[in-house]
Image: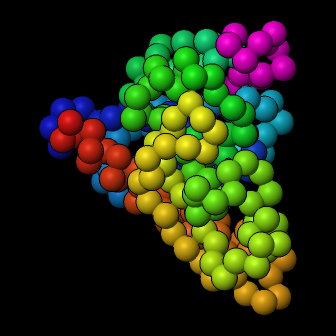
Amino acid sequence: MSGSPVKIAILFSGRGSNMRTLARHIARDNVPAELVLTVTNRPNAAGIAVAEAEGIACTIIDHEAFDSREAFDAELDATLRATGVELICCAGFMRLLTADFVNGWPDRLLNIHPSLLPKYKGLHTHKRALEAGDAEHGCTIHYMRPQMDDGPIILQKKVPVLADDTPETLAARVIEQEHIAYAQALDIALTKMAGA
Ligand code: GAR
């Protein structure tokens, strides 16, 4: 890839384990990218301490401080563009984005979801996979489109569902694969950008 490293932002709402994995992948694995910013919509997100520990800037944009989804998204968009961000990775960012926002980042907005999409869009994916009696479950990284948990799939990883699984044990098996998958999916997205 020629030119300067691709400027990346990671959006998160919670614990930040996917963010940590992506940050370390970018910092250590010779990835042609630079993590310039993390953004959370939750002022108490545990991931804020993760960003600090990794030495990455974290901006808090509390969605409760905004009157509308559009106003929040406009602030988010302005923050990302002011930092020169070129690619956004949603990593446990638990907030729906407006179509205007999503359409403003065509194929520049990635999301990870803890199911084998198109199965189990939305919440409680592990519980739903168990209730359905699925033999396998997993995670998906995809380009975002305005519809929730929709868009071209970059990568999926499967795990077996075991007879004595609870949502928690299944989630633990899936998150291990999420960490591997997101790093690989980022590499794929960067390669596509370089060739575009
Ligand atoms: C991950 O399991 C991710 O797939 C999920 O939130 C968790 C965040 O964990 N995302 C969604 O459900 C999005 N629809 P993390 O904060 O430790 O990365």
Establish if 65 lies above or below 57.
Answer: above
Evaluate whether residue 110 shows in this view. no
Q: Residue pushed farthest left?
A: 2
Evaluate whether residue 43 shows in this view. yes
Establish if 195 lies above or below 64.
Answer: below
Establish if 91 lies above or below 29.
Answer: above
Q: In the shown orientation, is residue 128 left or right of residue 175?
A: right
| Residue at 54 percent of width and 12 percent of height | 78
Q: In the rendered structure, which segment of residues is drawn in magenta?
A: 58-71
| Residue at 26 percent of width and 44 percent of height | 192
Work out whether residue 1 or residue 193 is closer to the camera in this orientation and state it: 193
> Image quarter for residue 40?
top right
| Residue at 82 percent of width and 66 percent of height | 127
Q: In the shown orientation, is residue 93 left or right of residue 165?
A: left
Question: Residue 173 location, x and y as percent?
Answer: 67, 75
Q: Residue pushed farthest bottom?
A: 163
The stretch drawn in magenta includes residue 62: yes
Quarter holding the C terminus is top left
